[in-house]
Amino acid sequence: MKTIILAGGLGTRLEEETTKKPKPMVEIGGKPLLWHIMNIYSGHGFNEFVIACGYKGELIKEYFAHFVLRNSDWSINLRDGAREMVSRNTPDWNIELVDTGYNTMTGGRIARLKKKIGKNRFMVTYGDGLGDVNIRELVSFHKSHGKLATLTAVRPPARFGGLLLDEDRIVEFSEKPQTGEGWINGGFFVFEPEAVDYMVGDDMPLERAPLENLAADG
């Protein structure tokens, strides 16, 4: 099963980094976010990826073009430039890097990949979100419910600490408690191929009409 990673956005909320690179290439622990995301899926046995590139997509392509070279030991004969791989420590990933447009919205990027999806079930995630998600259980959940789409919902923690007051006296303080309600889109999806029919046009955000209409249709 292929996993589509939406990696084409402008990343305006992380502008100090994304003026130089696309947000999926921002590093955590010396590795791009994109590498960490792919390891989540690979850790559960899913190694087929389609990266939907857009803004500064050439930097993502360059990263993977040199990936094996940078993550392997090899020798080179400087007389003729011949190289020989000595050892390699690279994951067993098959990656398609596709330019899906500079200004294309998330749903439009998936729509542009319709031919690559074909008649196969597929997964989607964002190129800037990490999570402790059991992908195998997610796929099993999707299969057991017989729906066109499955979305992983998360409940974010509160942004600020909470105070419990008794008139003008603080009686309890809690540091950023978990919110009691308000589930949001966590960004790990499983789709049947028919779901792509809900995504039409480059200006279509996945999070609006496609998901709204899928929900309305049950």
Image: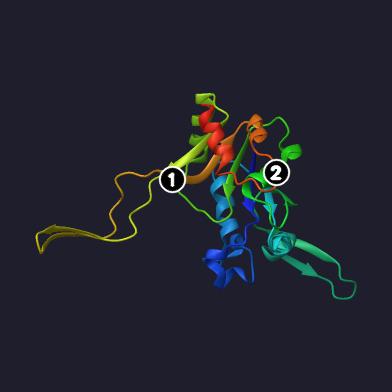
Residue designated by label 1 = 184
Q: Looking at numbered disc 2 in the image, what kind of residue is underneath it?
A: Gly
Residue shown at 62%/50% (left/top)?
Answer: 6
Left or right: 30 as drawn, with respect to 96: left
Front residue (pair 170, 85): 170
Q: Looking at numbered disc 1 in the image, what kind of residue is underneath it?
A: Ile
Which one is earlier in the sequence, the residue at label 1 or at label 2? 1
- Give how far across and how far down residue 198 sits, in percent: 64, 35
Q: Is residue 53 above or below residue 41?
A: below
In terms of image quadrants, where is residue 48?
top right
Front residue (pair 85, 58): 58
Q: Is residue 191 above or below residue 53?
A: above
Residue designated by label 2 = 201
Residue shown at 59%/38% (left/top)?
Answer: 210
Front residue (pair 213, 180): 213
- Give how far across and how far down residue 148 sits, in percent: 58, 29
